[in-house]
Image (spheres, rainbow, N blue to C red):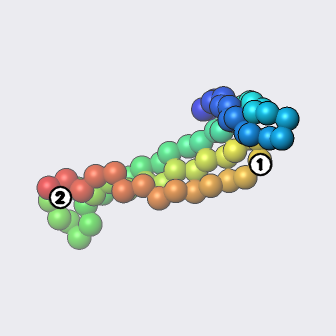
Amino acid sequence: MDVASGQRELATDQGPQTFRSSYTTAGLDVTFVFNPMRLRTPLEVGVRSIYNLRTNQWEVQPLVLDIGF
């Protein structure tokens, strides 16, 4: 689980205002190492899934981790 907090300052008619927010996400990475067509060079690929607890949204990112040359 990742937790972060941030702040930003906005200029308004009443002067600058500071807004603080907390960001919380949970995620999982899955990777595979394989040898396609019996090649000697292994490939490593994976997928990362992230769930944003604040917005209740899922995000999936492909990962290309290693091509061993």
Toward which corner of the image does residue 38 lie, by quadrant? bottom left
Residue positioned 68% across, 35% down in the render: 8
**Residue underneath mark 2:** 41
Question: Pointers 2 and 1 in contact (CB under 8 A)?
Answer: no
SS class of the residue under badge 1? loop
Nearest to the observer: residue 15 or residue 21 = 15
Mark 2 → mark 1, Cα distance in angstroms: 40 Å
Residue positioned 74% across, 40% down in the render: 11
- Residue 41 percent across, percent down from the top left: 17, 58
Q: Is residue 55 above or below residue 2?
A: below
Residue positioned 52% across, 56% down in the render: 61
- Residue 47 percent across, percent down from the top left: 48, 54
SS class of the residue under badge 2? loop
Quadrant into which the N terminus falls: top right
Quadrant into which the C terminus falls: bottom left
Q: Using the rendered image of the protein, determine whether residue 24 is visible from the camera's viewpoint.
A: no
- Residue 33 percent across, percent down from the top left: 32, 52
The amino acid type of the residue labelled 1 equals Asn
Apparent side of residue 63 relative to residue 57 in the rendered image (left or right): left
Residue positioned 64% across, 38% down in the render: 26
Q: Give the farthest residue toward the bottom.
A: 37
**Residue underneath mark 1:** 56
Query: Between tags 2 and 1, which lies in front?
Result: 1
